[in-house]
Image (cartoon, rainbow, N blue to C red):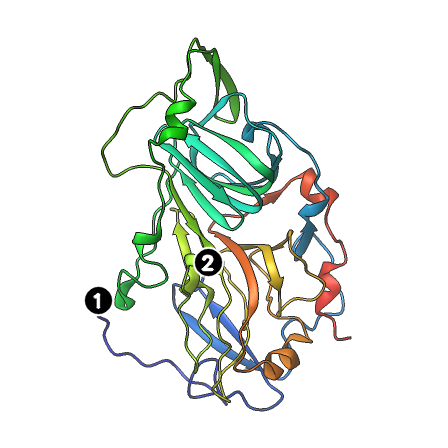
């Protein structure tokens, strides 16, 4: 990897280094393209870019408490749709009993994130045990089912007509963020063989968001062996070792975990706060002019947000400046050098997301006012 030396255009009073050594009483805003992957300019303002007094109309930040969606279902086919576009569907699913059927998604890869609970996962490739904090990537067309051992509360993100891949790690090398050696996969073990029976089983196949049922006189999860380089994989957030810089606040793109063609999934894990006196110590204000941004809060203290708790989701659509809440600045400075205490999943989509009636029912309509100075 290489890049020609280039210099930014400078106009007026600026800092020498982006997001560092800001003049007292000023606010930093990044205007960028392609999320945080493209060209960018830092603006330096006298007032916080989120200092609005009113915001009226459909373009506004939203938050919703997914804890209030109590619907339980025995199938991922009945998971509650929250946000969607042509390339991505974000659902939530609660399940507390073993699936009595198999499921196959022919519309795209599925990414499960286990917010609460634990269980056994069976699929074409074998079996593994899963628990809170696990990501499970399920390739399109895979047969699978779960048996909860504790009630499950999960997020499901579909890469519609697409597949999940790993991000390019570039100069930091292939072992950065997480070594592929920590990825778990299903195994053809005794528990998998024990569930192979001659009873009648039904497969629910999702294609074009419609369900077709196919019945067999035996369990189709009857594989005795396989070889290849395509399978279900599992990763727990605790095995992610985030990139860090004590002198510079890294952008969210540094925490990318999974990549699809039209969106990325990032994971924010506990890490040391920046220690350099001049370094920004929390997310900077930004426009994110090409992407919608969704955050699901898994656990911890979400230091850049007020009144957000585990199990909530925020939605920041492309088209308005957003960033930390007013009280976050003082909190970040007082915690300099300490560890952050938050785990969250971020989905950044290249195409606008639509929110559903289910999202609206649990939305906090006052979230837009949470940036107002107290």
Check residue 238 in the rendering and tell me which mark sits there, or answer none.
Answer: 2
Q: CA distance from mark 1 to mark 2?
A: 30 Å
Helix, strand or loop at mark 2 = helix
Horizontal side of 70 relative to 42 (left or right) equals right
Residue 111, can we see it? Answer: no
Position in image of residue 109 (x %, y %) = 41, 37
Considering depth in this image, is 255 or 224 the residue closer to the camera? Answer: 224
Which residue occupies the foreground of this view, 206 or 343?
A: 343
Q: Quadrant of residue 250?
A: bottom left
Foreground residue, 18 or 249?
A: 249
Q: What residue is disc 1 on?
A: 1
Q: Which mark is residue 368?
A: none
Image position of 228 (left or right of 24): left
Residue 297, given in percent of the width and then of the height, sits at: 60, 56
**Residue 261 drawn at (x, y percent):** 38, 46
Does dot 1 land on a helix, a strand or a loop? loop
Left or right of residue 247: residue 99: right
Q: Is residue 36 above or below residue 275?
A: above
Question: Is residue 258 or residue 24 the one in the foreground?
Answer: 258
Q: Tell me the quarter of the image containing the C terminus.
A: bottom right
Q: Is residue 270 visible?
A: yes
Q: Is residue 239 above or below residue 45?
A: above
Provide residue 200's location: percent of width, then percent of height.
47, 11
Q: Quadrant of residue 24?
A: bottom right
Residue found 42% across the figure and 71% down from its top: 40
Mark 1, other Cα within 10 Å: few <14 / some 14–19 / many ≥20: few
Q: Nearer the viewer, mark 1 or mark 2?
A: 2
């Amino acid at each position: 990897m290489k890049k020609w030396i280039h210099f930014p255009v400078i106009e007026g009073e600026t800092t020498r280094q982006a997001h560092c050594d800001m003049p007292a009483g000023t606010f930093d805003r990044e205007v960028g393209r392609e999320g945080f992957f493209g060209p960018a300019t830092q603006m330096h303002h006298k007032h916080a870019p989120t200092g609005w007094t009113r915001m009226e109309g459909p373009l506004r930040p939203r938050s919703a408490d997914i804890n209030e969606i109590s619907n339980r279902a025995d199938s991922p086919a009945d998971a509650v749709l929250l946000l969607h576009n042509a390339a991505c569907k974000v659902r939530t699913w609660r399940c507390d009993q073993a699936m009595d059927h198999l499921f196959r998604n022919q519309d795209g890869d599925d990414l499960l994130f286990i917010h609460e609970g634990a269980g056994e996962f069976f699929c074409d490739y074998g079996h593994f045990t899963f628990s809170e904090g696990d990501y499970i990537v399920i390739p399109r067309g895979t047969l699978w089912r779960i048996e909860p051992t504790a009630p499950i509360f999960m997020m499901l993100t579909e890469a519609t007509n697409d597949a999940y891949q790993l991000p390019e790690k570039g100069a930091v090398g292939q072992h950065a963020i997480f070594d592929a050696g920590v990825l778990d996969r299903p195994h053809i073990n005794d528990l998998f063989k024990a569930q192979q029976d001659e009873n009648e089983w039904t497969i629910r196949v999702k294609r074009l968001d419609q369900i077709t049922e196919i019945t067999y006189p035996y369990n189709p999860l009857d594989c005795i062996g396989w070889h290849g380089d395509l399978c279900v994989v599992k990763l727990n957030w605790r095995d992610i070792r985030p990139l860090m810089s004590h002198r510079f606040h890294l952008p969210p793109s540094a925490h990318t975990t999974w990549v699809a063609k039209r969106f990325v999934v990032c994971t924010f894990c506990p890490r040391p706060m920046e220690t350099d006196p001049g370094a920004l110590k929390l997310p900077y204000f930004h426009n994110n002019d090409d992407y919608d941004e969704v955050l699901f809060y898994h656990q911890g203290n979400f230091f850049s947000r007020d009144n957000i708790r585990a199990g909530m989701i925020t939605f920041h659509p492309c088209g308005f400046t957003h960033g930390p809440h007013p009280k976050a600045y003082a909190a970040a400075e007082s915690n300099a050098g300490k560890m952050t205490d938050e785990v969250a999943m971020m989905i950044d989509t290249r195409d606008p997301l639509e929110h559903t009636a289910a999202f609206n029912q649990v939305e906090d309509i006052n979230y837009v006012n949470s940036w107002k100075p107290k």
